[in-house]
Image (cartoon, rainbow, N blue to C red):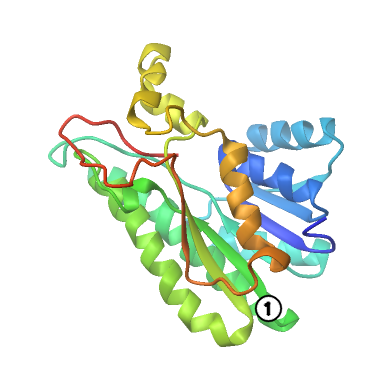
Amino acid sequence: MLLEDKVALITGGTSGIGLATAHLFASEGASVAIVGRSQERGAKALKYLSSRGYEATYHRGDVSKEEDSIRVVKEVVEIYGGIDILVNAAGVFTGGPITDLSVEDWDRTINVNLRGTFLMSKFVVPYMLRKGGGSIINVSSTAGVSPYPNGTAYCSAKAAVIAFTRALALELASKGIRVNVVVPGLTDTPMLRSIAGSEEAFARFPQLVPIGKIAVPEQVAKAILFLASEDLSSYITGALLVVDGGMTAGRVTTAGSQASTR
């Protein structure tokens, strides 16, 4: 029960890494609130957790919008009395040559991945300060440390999340709030399957990973749990924890290589 009596707010919590984290956190004793844009996916996520014996609350919102972020944070605090852990797992992917990338796609990618991380952190931190501390875990991607062709928007956003994490960690270190970032590689999520476009293309992804297989969301969730737990990581802040099966260990990116993405 590593998170007993803790309240965790998880963005992007209706699928993929976010949902796996919600499940794991609940199993470790946390009260869990998940955030997502789709009411339908939110209902499915709650049903999934309930079928495994866990309860959570769903809060509909777009983390890239200031008004939604403020409202969601207030809702969670009203229900649970505070927030101890924030996991910024919401993300979107846009790829393609820069000449084909629309300004709207660029803005959406930056806004959800980076602006959303900023907004949720901004509005959660005051409540953590009232409780004397907390833990923020941001979810980046190997795209942020090992860029690839035709990924300028996503790579830029995820690299910025890493820089944001380190800067905020320094800002809050003396105030009892730890801020760290998890960097997943290829992970079996709806996002990655959408990027692949077909089962045949998806089946080729393990060839890009030295360990010979892609991750499942639960493996990334365990890394997030490690950073969330005071028992396991109380002296860790500003850290980058790579969970990629060795993809970024000296890899040379070549033209035509696939995205390293959640």
**Quadrant including the N terminus:** bottom right
Q: Residue at x 65, y 72 (%)?
A: 234
Residue pictured at 56% horizontal, 44% vertical: 220
Please name whichever residue, 66 or 31, is drawn nearer the observer in this view of the structure: 31
Q: Residue furthest top?
A: 200
How far across and down, in percent of the image, does residue 136 sit? 58, 66
User: Is any part of residue 36 visible from this angle?
Assistant: no
Of residues 201 and 35, the one drawn nearer to the viewer in this rendering: 201
Q: Is residue 55 visible?
A: yes
Q: Which residue is mark 1?
A: 133
Q: Is residue 101 above or below residue 237?
A: above
The quarter of the rendered structure image containing the C terminus is: top left
Q: Is residue 131 left or right of residue 224?
A: right
State the image coordinates of residue 129 (x, y, percent, origin top left): 67, 82
Mark 1: which secondary structure?
A: loop
Q: Is residue 29 left or right of residue 18?
A: right
Residue 117 point in image, percent of width and height: 48, 61
- Where does the image place residue 160, in percent across and percent down from the top left? 34, 61
Amino acid identity at mark 1: Gly
Most extreme residue toward the left is: 99
Callout 1 crowding tier (Cα within 10 Å): few <14, some 14–19, many ≥20: many
